[in-house]
Amino acid sequence: NAGVTQTPKFQVLKTGQSMTLQCAQDMNHNSMYWYRQDPGMGLRLIYYSASEGTTDKGEVPNGYNVSRLNKREFSLRLESAAPSQTSVYFCASSTPSGIGVEQFFGPGTRLTVL
Amino acid sequence: AQSVAQPEDQVNVAEGNPLTVKCTYSVSGNPYLFWYVQYPNRGLQFLLKYITGDNLVKGSYGFEAEFNKSQTSFHLKKPSALVSDSALYFCAVRDAFSGGYNKLIFGAGTRLAVHP
């Protein structure tokens, strides 16, 4: 099992450019999440998806869109990148059943917007 | 408002000494609490969780955490620190308003430095 994989690992964009961050999991999890990590702020939830075809906003959704392509894949799109979106982005997944199940995280994408 | 506080940005410990990384929380209803560790340039790895039951929870790599309801705390502990424990540690609580999902609220993180 590869667990949760993310591509790319690193990306540099210019202000106004667009890009899509890819995430896939092979653990047959229903729920998937996108977070951003900024120094001194921990992880903040951008979007999450309970199952294929459903997505919901998290704490900081502005400037992002997501697509739950199928059960395995959950992508994050920046339509017009801004310097404030410079961050490390993590994808995570979990089983939906029960309360208090842990999330499994990918290795992250380090994004710099100039 | 629901929140998690990790009052120390960094904790320094000598190898072989006990370590404690502090976490306090504020959440509606029963808390579901987690600790994660992040090694450099890696994703977060689950260490342990408290859902219900015994206040002392044991997890991976010899770590344990003590749940204290009256102090709303969930401190991470290890009896004897290793240099390889040096990493960034995050405390998290399940968002009580996340319905059937398990949305997590994270603390800002504490960097643990274990010196030889």
Image (cartoon, coloured by chain):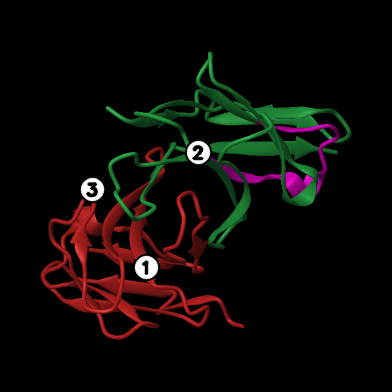
Chain colours: A red, B green
Image position, residue A81 (x, y; %): 16, 66
Q: Nearer the viewer, mark 3 or mark 2?
A: 3
Residue pointed to by mark 2 = B109
Image position, residue B62 (x, y; %): 80, 44
Q: CA distance from mark 2 to mark 1?
A: 22 Å
Residue A38 visible in the displayed image: no
Q: SS at mark 3?
A: loop
The local crowd at label 3, few if under 14, some if 14 to 19, many if 20 or more residues have their Cα within 10 Å, is few
Residue positioned most to the bottom? A70
The amino acid at mark 1 is Met
Are discs 1 and 3 located on one and the same chain? yes
- In terms of depth relative to the viewer, which is nearer, A40 or B35? B35
Question: Which residue is painted at 44% across and 37% down in the image?
Answer: B108
Residue pointed to by mark 3 = A59
Q: CA distance from mark 1 to mark 3?
A: 15 Å
Q: Which residues are magenta?
A: B76-90
Question: Which residue is painted at 69% across and 27% down in the image?
Answer: B20
Image position, residue A30 (x, y; %): 39, 73
Residue pointed to by mark 1 = A32
The amino acid at mark 3 is Glu
Quadrant hosting residue A64: bottom left
Q: Which comes sooner in the sequence, label 1 or label 3?
A: 1
Q: CA distance from mark 3 to mark 2?
A: 18 Å
Q: SS at mark 1?
A: strand
Q: Chain of mark 1?
A: A
Q: Chain of mark 3?
A: A
Q: SS at mark 2?
A: loop
Q: Chain of mark 2?
A: B
Q: Quadrant of the N terminus of chain B?
A: top left
